[in-house]
Image (cartoon, coloured by chain):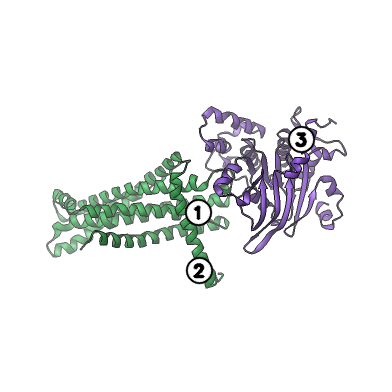
């Protein structure tokens, strides 16, 4: 079995990065229609780390992503993204910050009246003052990353669910954002397509070292991410040697009853004594 | 059906008025802040203006013709058939042209805007737009408001002219009135105040149609059923607002210009 590339060690977050964190939730609470969804949650995402967020349906997983992006405002607490307190920022200021963050929505949320090319190029075109050639190259690169270069002129309605999800990833990564947020990227997909999507996320983590939060229902996806690395030479995901899980920057966060009940790595998760978590991961 | 307490209803109503005012205010203030979406505005102007032309042509023609037909009978009894051109002209330019065009465009476009933006809301496309660093109010709402105000102004002029033409056809071919006399009396009766009143109204109606349509779209909730509800509410609310605004503006301008 091939050893993981040395780059993995280089991308492990430094103590300073871990201390500051690219995303920091500090005692955040939010309720919808007087029903609490998150109550006093705190966690930090270190630079280069990917953190998978688990919890039953309605436990506030997607809400965490929307809060991090400033699409929702918490009732109390502070959220720091790349050093900015998004809870104190006006919508106008948030637009600049959001340009450094990519998000893949649960149902892809592609603009259905635009072609794949226009969807992927959306952010570049919105920034303005770019020529046709300047847009074409990054769009091709982005689509080739998800292996969908031949779909440029198709509309989202002409794509399968898995292809739409991959186009959404291409749209999110086109400007090489510092943070990526994935909302159930493999939800409702068949196992083969799910593995393709997970491979892309691992590639993004290991090749571009992008920090990310990933909401998912599928434990096996997160375990694959914790036990594999991306090998650029073979352009494939490879298994880590036994006991080398700490080599990849992968964390787990579990929500229950509006609170975080677990925040740690795969090793800690596997050895937890919490009955609920043991049942959840079994 | 779930009953709602009067207090909650009052709160929701005040909240809706506040949200609508905020959206309408931002739609205007965005005109003075870049980026300006000229291509989107042109596209909307084509969809709203050119797309509404067939119904505006048909309603303008038929309203003018019906006005002439109904008035002619009464005027004939008093031997005043020659006044028909004046009656159609003042009626169309001051009142019927703007209001019929406004209601037709509201039915066609307020519903279109509410359903389009509502669908984008429920499929998270608006959130995706915000996540990609684009302000949906600037990209989607302001171009629709500008395009509707601009195009409704010209659609109303077309409707007025076609109404006069419809009246001319009825007066000439059914009541034997002289074609030239009809047009000269129609033209001579109009004063500056009439034309101004007829051209101020479409600007207000256009603003109402676009902001109400966009407001209901941007606040749609509850999946496809919610989009359907938003579409219906947009047409009802914009039509009622057009009628109420018409009454208020007519009274105001009449007072300003000291109409007898």
Pointer 3 chain: A
Whole-percent x and y of residue A60? 69, 55
10 Å neighbourhood of mark 3: few (<14), some, or many (≥20)? many
Q: Residues within 10 Å of mark 2 (few under 14, many from 20)?
A: few
Q: CA distance from mark 3 to mark 2?
A: 56 Å
Nearer mark to the viewer, of 2 and 1: 2
Q: Which chain shows up in green?
A: B
Q: CA distance from mark 3 to mark 1?
A: 45 Å
Q: Residue B195, image x and y in percent?
A: 25, 52
Residue receiving disc 3: A11
Q: Label 2 marks which chain's residue?
A: B
* Residue denoted by label 2: B10
Q: Secondary structure at mark 3?
A: helix
Quadrant in which the N terminus of chain A appears: top right
* Mark 3 on the same chain as mark 1: no
Give the number of the disc on residue A118.
none
The answer to whether residue A79 is above or below residue B75 is above
Q: Chain of mark 1?
A: B
**Quarter of the view holding residue A244:** top right
Image-based side of B106 in relation to B250, left or right: right
Taking depth in this image into account, of A97 and A254 the one nearest to the observer is A97
Direction from residue B58 to residue B38 in the image, left or right: right
C-beta proximity under 8 Å, tags 3 and 2? no
Q: Residue at coordinates 54% horizontally, 43% vertically from top-left?
A: B134
Instruction: Please determine whether, in this image, residue A231 is positioned above or below residue B12.
Output: above
In primary-sequence order, the first of circles 2 and 1 is: 2
Identify the chain drawn in purple: A
Mark seen at residue B217: 1
Q: CA distance from mark 2 to mark 1?
A: 22 Å
């Amino acid at each position: 079995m091939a050893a993981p590339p040395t780059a993995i060690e280089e991308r492990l977050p430094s103590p300073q990065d871990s201390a500051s964190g690219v995303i920091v939730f500090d005692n955040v609470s939010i309720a919808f229609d007087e029903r609490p969804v998150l109550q006093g949650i705190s966690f930090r995402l270190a630079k280069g780390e990917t953190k998978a967020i688990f919890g039953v349906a309605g436990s506030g997983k997607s809400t965490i992503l929307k809060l991090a992006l400033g699409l929702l405002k918490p009732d109390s607490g502070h959220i720091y993204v790349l050093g900015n307190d998004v809870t104190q920022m006006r919508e106008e200021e948030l637009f600049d910050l959001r340009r450094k963050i990519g998000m893949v929505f649960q149902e892809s949320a592609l603009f259905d009246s635009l072609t794949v090319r226009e969807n992927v190029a959306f952010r570049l075109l919105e920034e303005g003052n770019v020529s046709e050639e300047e847009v074409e190259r990054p769009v091709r690169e982005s689509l080739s990353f998800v292996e969908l270069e031949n779909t440029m002129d198709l509309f989202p309605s002409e794509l399968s669910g898995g292809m739409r999800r991959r186009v959404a990833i291409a749209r999110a990564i086109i400007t090489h954002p510092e943070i990526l947020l994935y909302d159930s990227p493999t939800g409702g997909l068949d196992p083969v397509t799910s593995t393709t999507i997970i491979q892309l996320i691992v590639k993004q983590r290991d090749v571009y070292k992008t920090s990310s939060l990933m909401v998912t229902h599928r434990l096996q996806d997160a375990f694959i991410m914790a036990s594999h690395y991306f090998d650029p030479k073979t352009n494939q995901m490879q298994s880590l040697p036994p006991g080398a899980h700490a080599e990849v920057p992968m964390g787990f966060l579990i929500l229950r009853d509006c609170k975080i009940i677990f925040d740690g790595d795969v090793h800690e998760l596997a050895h937890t004594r919490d009955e609920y978590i043991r049942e959840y991961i079994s | 059906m779930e009953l709602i307490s009067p207090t909650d209803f009052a709160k929701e109503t005040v909240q809706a008025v506040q949200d609508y005012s905020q959206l309408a205010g931002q739609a205007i203030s965005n005109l003075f802040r870049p980026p300006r979406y000229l291509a989107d505005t042109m596209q909307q102007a084509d969809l709203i203006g050119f797309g509404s032309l067939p119904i505006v042509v048909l309603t303008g023609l038929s309203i003018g013709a019906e006005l002439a037909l109904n008035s002619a009978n009464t005027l004939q009894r008093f031997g005043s058939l020659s006044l028909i051109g004046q009656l159609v002209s003042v009626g169309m330019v001051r009142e019927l042209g703007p209001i019929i065009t406004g209601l037709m465009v509201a039915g066609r476009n307020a519903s279109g805007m509410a359903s389009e933006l509502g669908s984008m809301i429920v499929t998270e496309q608006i959130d995706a737009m915000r996540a990609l660093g684009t302000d949906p109010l600037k990209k989607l709402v302001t171009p629709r408001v500008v395009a509707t105000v601009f195009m409704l102004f010209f659609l109303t002029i077309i409707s007025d002219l076609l109404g006069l033409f419809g009246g001319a056809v009825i007066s000439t071919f059914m009541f034997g009135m002289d074609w030239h006399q009809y047009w000269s009396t129609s033209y001579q009766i109009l004063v500056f105040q009439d034309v101004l009143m007829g051209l101020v109204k479409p600007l207000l109606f256009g603003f109402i149609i676009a902001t109400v349509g966009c407001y209901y779209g941007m606040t749609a909730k509850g999946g496809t059923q919610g989009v359907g509800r938003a579409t219906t509410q947009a047409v009802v609310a914009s039509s009622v607002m057009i009628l109420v605004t018409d009454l208020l503006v007519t009274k105001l301008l009449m007072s300003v210009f000291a109409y007898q």
